[in-house]
Amino acid sequence: MHVQKSAPILLHRILLFGLFFILLYLSFSVLKYFIVPVVWAIIIAYMTWPIYRWILKKCGEQRTNLSATLMLLLIILVIGVPFVFAIFILQNEGQQLFNAVQQQLFSGHLNLPAFITGLPIIGHDIQRILDELNSDPHALRQNIMLWLQSHVNYGRLVLGEISRNLVKLFFALFSLFFFYRDGITLLNQFKHALEKVVGPRIHHYLKTISQTTRAVVYGIGLTAIAQAILAGLSYFIAGVPNPMFLTIITFVLALIPFGTPISYIAVSLWLFSQGQIFAAIGVLTWGVCIVSTSDNVIRPLVISGATQVPFLLIMFGVLGGIASFGLIGLFIGPVVLAILLAIWREWIHEQQLENSTSTSE
């Protein structure tokens, strides 16, 4: 009799779980195109939440729509104005830099310092390539034009990708408003659901995850900004053409592990090729001694001792995140690995406490 009653209950649970996973799959199919904008909105809302709380306090706790609107306008102003300025700089100075490089390539007077062309193994090949370029600049122009014509479809793909990213930006900002307005409610529901699965310890885990996430994101962003400013300062002092353009490029590269040296080494090589030896040595020395080492000063200030994340984990997180998720992976990758590390450390700490308690008893 008991078996007969338990069979329908088991069948009911199986059907319920089956229906749940079907709905979960269908929901993912519907929302998968909006995952990236929503994740961007979550990251921005999370990082700027203290500012939103301050605005909400000034406007009144009940005026969530007004507070969310003001915060969204502030985000658009803070992100949009520098973004438009960067596009203007990239377009203006980028065109000038392209013309300067083109003129130098087709001048027939390309040269590099003797210590580069005299390098063992590769120095001879570098000199041979330079001689070939200088002997027939017009052939180089023709080869470049042929290459551009054969890759014209890539340009269309880039334009299409830019259009898609603009649409994603709109949905990210649209979602951001609701995360500000309803963030507390959503977070409480999320905590309640996790508490049912994990138990009351989830609140301690979430606190650790929150500290780690904010530290990692701030660490990556602030380090990139600081390194770009320091490198840009050397570009201005050295008199490099289009320094603002190069500073923006340095910032983008600084977000990637070992990306910053690419920028200042390239600038140093260009200065060497122009015969500006002292300026080239100055940029290279400043880059190695100040720009690259600033990471060791900034990260400890941003990331406290309790949330220290190994550089190797950050590097794998950034590179793997970009490969898996695109630009958003720049933050998702290291954050996911940092959260995993934080949970691992908390679990180990709990085990040690339990062992010490049982030993003392």
Image (cartoon, grey):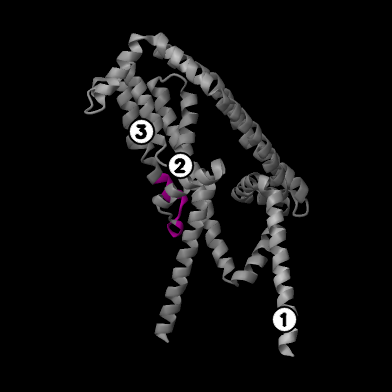
Q: Decide: is 270 above or below 18.
A: above
Q: Residues within 10 Å of mark 2 (few under 14, many from 20)?
A: many
Could you say which quadrant of the image residue 137 lies in?
Answer: top left
First-in-chain label (3 vs 1): 1
Three-letter amino acid code at disc 1? Ala
- Label 2 amino acid? Thr
* Cα separation between marks 2 and 1: 60 Å
Asked if the residue at tag 1 contacts the one at tag 2, i.e. Cβ–Cβ closer than 8 Å, the answer is no
| Nearest to N terminus: mark 2 or mark 3 | 2
Q: Which residue is mark 1?
A: 7
Instruction: Tell me where the magenta segment starts and ends, as one range.
Output: 297-307
Q: Quadrant of the C terminus?
A: bottom left
**Magenta segment, prevailing SS (helix, strand or loop):** helix
239 falls in the magenta region:
no
**Residue 287: numbered disc:** 3
Viewer-nearest of discs 3 and 1: 1
Q: Which residue is mark 2?
A: 223
Separation of residues labelled 3 and 1 (CA atoms)? 72 Å
Q: Amino acid at mark 3?
A: Gly
